[in-house]
Image: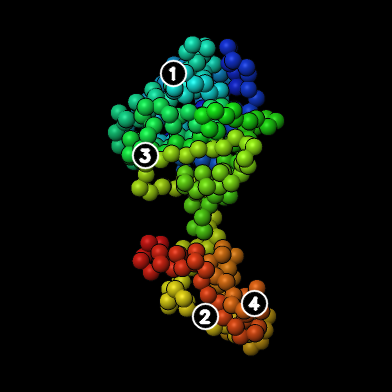
């Protein structure tokens, strides 16, 4: 079972109001609740009321998030962040300058006491969110993190997070990543894939996302439609008996050129999808079409050899 708590706070009594945080978490909710094919994904709870979110409401929701019964828990926070005593504090509507809200160290303490959770993902879209890596539960060697814990932040410890119109810049890009931008060939979106995607979206003048984790494998946060179905990936060792094999082609692979060969054309359709996913490349010409017409060949790319190995080892 997978739970997600999505907290978006625009309304503050003692801090400037924000405009995009509620919109941010509602957009994230639409993507996390289901996979691209419509299958259920996370059971999401939104904390985004127009009156804001109090510290007590936030803590109560966190208690439910980390309660027994789920094996994956995800927290997404969009709102003000403040640094107090070397700790990042997630500001709540009733927060004050002295006690802004819920400290990340407090959340880490709750996670440390949780039982049954295989993976915990924390995503912080707030100013100075990179300071989360400096709290005692998180600082230092990655081994000090609870096993299975990942923290992705929108900015470094010394940076603000930017709003653009009615959305945050980070959340807009984050949603694009969840929608498929960060998906691998099989359509899987993981927390490490999200960071790789997001880190390329900001230049040296922008806020910079940070990522820290203690995981031995990253579970799927969302599944998108694959570039190449697993059934076709499993055919790679058949089509390419060795990683370096060059598969001879001829005009019978191309359906527009008679005489046609149904088996070759079915294989060619697989090769074309693999080519689009950068798993296969033609030899001696830029296009598979001409490789077939000119009786040339095709071969696996380094990424293609990786998926061939996975198929050979029955990992697909």
The residue lying furthest to the bottom in this view is 259
Mark closer to the chain start, 1 or 3: 1
Mark closer to the chain start, 3 or 4: 3
- Where in the figure is residue 216, as x and y percent of width and height? 35, 47
User: Would you place residue 28 above or below residue 287 in this image?
Assistant: above
User: Would you place residue 155 above or below residue 242 in this image?
Assistant: above
Q: Which colour scheme is used?
A: rainbow
Q: Which residue is drawn at 36% across and 29% down?
A: 137
Q: Mark 2 points at which residue?
A: 247
Answer yes or no: is residue 305 visible: yes
> How much space separates mark 1 and mark 4, taking CA atoms?
61 Å
Q: In the rendered image, which quarter is residue 250 located in?
A: bottom right
Other residues around mark 1 within 10 Å, as few (<14) / some (14–19) / many (≥20):
few
Q: Is residue 160 left or right of residue 67?
A: right
Q: Is residue 123 left or right of residue 167?
A: left
| Marker count (numbered) | 4
Residue 251 or residue 96, whichever sits in front:
96
Q: Residue at x 64, y 77 (%)?
A: 285
Q: Residue at x 47, y 46 (%)?
A: 192
- State if disc 1 and disc 2 touch (CB < 8 Å): no
| Secondary-structure class at tag 4 | loop
Mark closer to the chain start, 3 or 2: 3
Q: Nearer the viewer, mark 3 or mark 2?
A: 3
Q: Which of marks 2 and 1 is in front?
A: 1
Q: Name the residue under label 1.
A: 85
Q: Mark 3 points at which residue?
A: 142
> How much space separates mark 3 and mark 4, taking CA atoms?
46 Å
Q: Which of marks 3 and 4 is in front?
A: 3
Mark closer to the chain start, 4 or 2: 2
Q: In the rendered image, which quarter is residue 254 located in?
A: bottom right
Q: Name the residue under label 4.
A: 285
Q: Which of the image's four quarters has the C terminus?
A: bottom left
């Amino acid at each position: 079972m997978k739970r997600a708590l999505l907290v978006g706070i625009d309304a503050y009594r003692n801090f400037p109001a924000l405009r995009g945080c509620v919109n941010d978490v509602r957009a994230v909710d639409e993507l996390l609740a289901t996979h691209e094919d419509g299958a259920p994904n996370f059971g999401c709870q939104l904390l985004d009321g127009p009156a804001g979110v109090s510290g007590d409401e936030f803590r109560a929701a966190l208690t439910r998030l980390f309660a027994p019964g789920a094996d994956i828990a995800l927290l997404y926070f969009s709102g003000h962040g403040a640094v107090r005593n070397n700790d990042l504090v997630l500001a709540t509507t009733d927060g004050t300058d002295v006690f802004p809200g819920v400290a990340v160290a407090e959340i880490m303490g709750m996670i440390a006491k949780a039982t049954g959770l295989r993976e915990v993902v924390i995503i912080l879209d707030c100013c100075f969110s990179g300071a989360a890596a400096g709290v005692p539960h998180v600082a230092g060697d990655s081994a000090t993190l609870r096993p299975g814990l990942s923290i992705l932040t929108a900015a470094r410890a010394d940076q603000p997070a930017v709003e653009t119109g009615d959305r945050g810049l980070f959340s807009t890009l984050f949603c694009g990543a969840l929608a498929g931008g960060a998906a691998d060939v099989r359509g899987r979106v993981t927390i490490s894939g999200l960071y790789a995607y997001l880190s390329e979206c900001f230049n040296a003048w922008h806020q910079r996302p940070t990522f820290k984790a203690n995981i031995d494998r990253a579970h799927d946060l969302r599944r998108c439609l694959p570039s190449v179905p697993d059934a076709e990936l499993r055919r790679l060792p058949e089509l390419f008996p060795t990683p370096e094999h060059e598969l001879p082609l001829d005009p019978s692979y191309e359906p527009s050129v008679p005489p046609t060969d149904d088996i070759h054309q079915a294989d060619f359709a697989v090769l074309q999808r693999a080519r689009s996913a950068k798993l296969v490349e033609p030899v001696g010409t830029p296009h598979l079409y001409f490789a077939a017409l000119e009786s040339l060949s095709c071969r696996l790319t380094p990424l293609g050899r990786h998926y061939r190995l996975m198929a050979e080892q029955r990992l697909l």
